[in-house]
Image (spheres, rainbow, N blue to C red):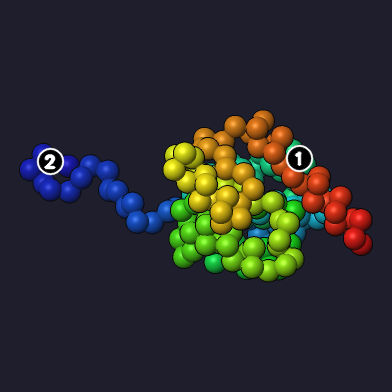
């Protein structure tokens, strides 16, 4: 391209997120069902994260740590998935499309079946500014991005095992 043209050398389309060719989003239903079947009986974590890269990274790491992982790209999807699947914990970003993370947490806490559900905010926003608001919305923990997966593992082990013990006692 000559310097006199006004088109950029590399077209940039920020408004559209294109999944990579090896993306989890491209797995067939059969592959997803096979993968989930291998994780049956394991604690289920719902990730609500609008960034595809972050969602996939968290999913892969948590699956290698022995969790069954469900993922939603927006707040409304997180509420729907939580209602259908009753996860053992939710990792929730503050800024989500359609419904923000705090609104999702408040809506979940309105339903008795989610009263004790561990909700963990995972955000890049300053915790000094948002932690109290997150706790008031019903969240149990606030973790700063980039995620320290060792710290996340400790939090999940503590919260999920406590919730699962209550579930099995009442069954």
| Residue at 32%, 52% in the rendered image | 13
| Residue at 92%, 56% in the rendered image | 169
Most foreground residue, 4 or 17: 17
The C terminus lies in quadrant: bottom right
Describe the element under mark 2 as helix, strand or loop: loop
Report whether residue 53 is seen: no
Give the image quarter of residue 97: bottom left
| Residue at 53%, 37% in the rendered image | 144
Toward the left, the furthest residue is: 4
Residue 63: x and y, percent?
A: 71, 43
Q: Which of marks 2 and 1 is in front?
A: 1
127 w.r.t. 18: above or below: above
Whichever of callouts 2 and 1 sits on the residue coming sooner in the sequence is 2
Residue 99: x and y, percent?
A: 49, 63
| Residue at 61%, 51% in the rendered image | 139
Locate residue 81 relative to residue 113 in the image: left or right. Answer: left
- The circle on residue 2 is 2
Residue 105: x and y, percent?
A: 59, 59
Locate residue 84 relative to residue 57 in the image: left or right. Answer: right
In three-dimensional space, the C-alpha distance between marks 2 and 1, rounded to whole angstroms, equals 60 Å
Locate residue 103 relative to residue 166 in the image: left or right. Answer: left
Q: Name the residue under label 1.
A: 158
Most foreground residue, 125 or 83: 125
The N terminus lies in quadrant: top left
Q: How crowded is mark 1: few (under 14 residues within 10 Å), some or many (20 or more)?
A: few
């Amino acid at each position: 391209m000559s310097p006199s043209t006004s088109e950029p050398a590399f077209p940039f389309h920020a408004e559209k997120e294109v999944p990579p060719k090896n993306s989890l989003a491209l797995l067939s239903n059969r592959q997803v069902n096979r993968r989930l079947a291998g994780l049956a009986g394991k604690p289920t974590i719902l990730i609500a994260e609008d960034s595809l890269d972050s969602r996939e990274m968290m999913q892969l790491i948590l699956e290698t740590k022995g969790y069954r992982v469900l993922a939603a790209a927006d707040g409304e999807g997180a509420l729907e998935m939580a209602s259908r699947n009753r996860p053992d914990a939710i990792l929730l970003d503050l800024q989500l499309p359609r419904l923000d993370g705090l609104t999702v947490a408040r809506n979940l806490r309105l339903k008795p079946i989610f009263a004790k559900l561990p909700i963990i905010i995972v955000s890049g926003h300053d915790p000094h500014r948002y932690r109290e608001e997150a706790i008031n919305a019903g969240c149990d923990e606030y973790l700063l991005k980039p995620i320290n997966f060792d710290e996340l593992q400790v939090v999940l082990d503590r919260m999920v095992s406590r919730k699962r013990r209550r579930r099995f006692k009442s069954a």
